[in-house]
Image (cartoon, helix red, strand yellow):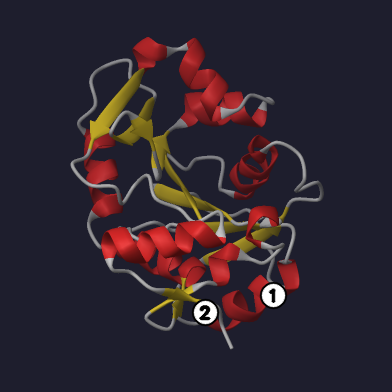
Amino acid sequence: MPEATHGTGFGIGAVVLAAGAGRRMGHRPKSLLQRDGEPLLLRQVRLLAAAGCAPIVVVLGHHRQALLRVLEPAQTRYRPLQWVTNPAPEEDPASSLACGLQALPSDTSTILVTLGDQPLLQDGDAQAVLDAWRSRAAGVQLVVPVHGGEPGHPLAFGAVVRAAVQGGASVRAWRRAHPGQVAQLVADHARYTTDVDTPQALHGLEQAHGVHLAWPA
């Protein structure tokens, strides 16, 4: 099983959070919903790879076997694509992020974190977050895309926030405790802040954005 392994560090690593149970979606794996025939999970991996992220670590938990059925064949297209399993995925999402960060090389200088069920992200969106990170002011340790006052994903950060999360903090708690070290990327679109948690959200997505998601056959 090609679980995530430690190795030589890269400049930009990414963590995709896909460990949830999907309770509000009828206990179904939301990241396997398909847009134009492509599972959202693989869409995320493709967009991150296009932005230069390597390695990309997917955090699994609930629905692990179902997600592996799409991840394993994709390794030949997206290298280095890896995964790690959160042994306690029912805990706070911070535990899944900590698992993903642990799987990245220790000298990864920039880390993007995103969700496995963001259907609107496009080519260039991850790059815009990276550009904001690279041009950040001195002392900024976290870049958060924001639309309509709502924070979204992908987030970008480096060693300081990584150490805090691996030490047991959540990004949300760290952000609230260190507002002066957080920069916002204000977006005029909802791509960063849109995910799908309920069947009603699927209907709303189609009504508002004309995007249809379908469960795999």
Residue 117 visible to an observer of this rendering? no
Could you tell me which secondary element the residue under label 1 belongs to? helix
N-terminal label among 1 and 2: 1
The spot of residue 64 in percent (x, y) is 73, 67
Q: Is residue 61 left or right of residue 185?
A: right
Query: Is any atom of residue 57 visible in this view?
Result: yes
Q: Residues within 10 Å of mark 2 (few under 14, many from 20)?
A: some
Q: Is residue 183 left or right of residue 77?
A: left
The residue shown at (56%, 47%) is 105
The residue indicated by pointer 2 is 74
Give percent across and percent down for residue 71: 58, 75
Give the secondary structure at mark 2: helix
Is residue 171 rendered to the left or right of residue 169?
A: left
Query: Residue pushed farthest right?
Result: 87
Q: Nearer the viewer, residue 173 or 201?
A: 201
CA distance for labels 1 and 2: 14 Å
Q: Tell which of 165 and 199 is nearer to you.
A: 199
The answer to which quarter of the image holds residue 32 is bottom right
Q: In the picture shown, does residue 40 fall above or below 161?
A: below
Mark 1 closeness class: few <14, some 14–19, many ≥20 residues within 10 Å = few
Apparent side of residue 148 relative to residue 141 in the rendered image (left or right)? left
Residue matched to label 1: 66
| Quadrant for the N terminus in the image | bottom right
Image label count: 2
Amino acid tagged 2: Ala
Q: Nearer the viewer, residue 61 or 48?
A: 61
Image quadrant in which you'd find residue 63? bottom right
Name the quarter where the C terminus is drawn: bottom right
The amino acid type, in three-letter code, at marker 1 is Ala
Tell me what residue is drawn at x 55 percent, y 54 percent: 197
The residue located at (64%, 71%) in the rendering is 67
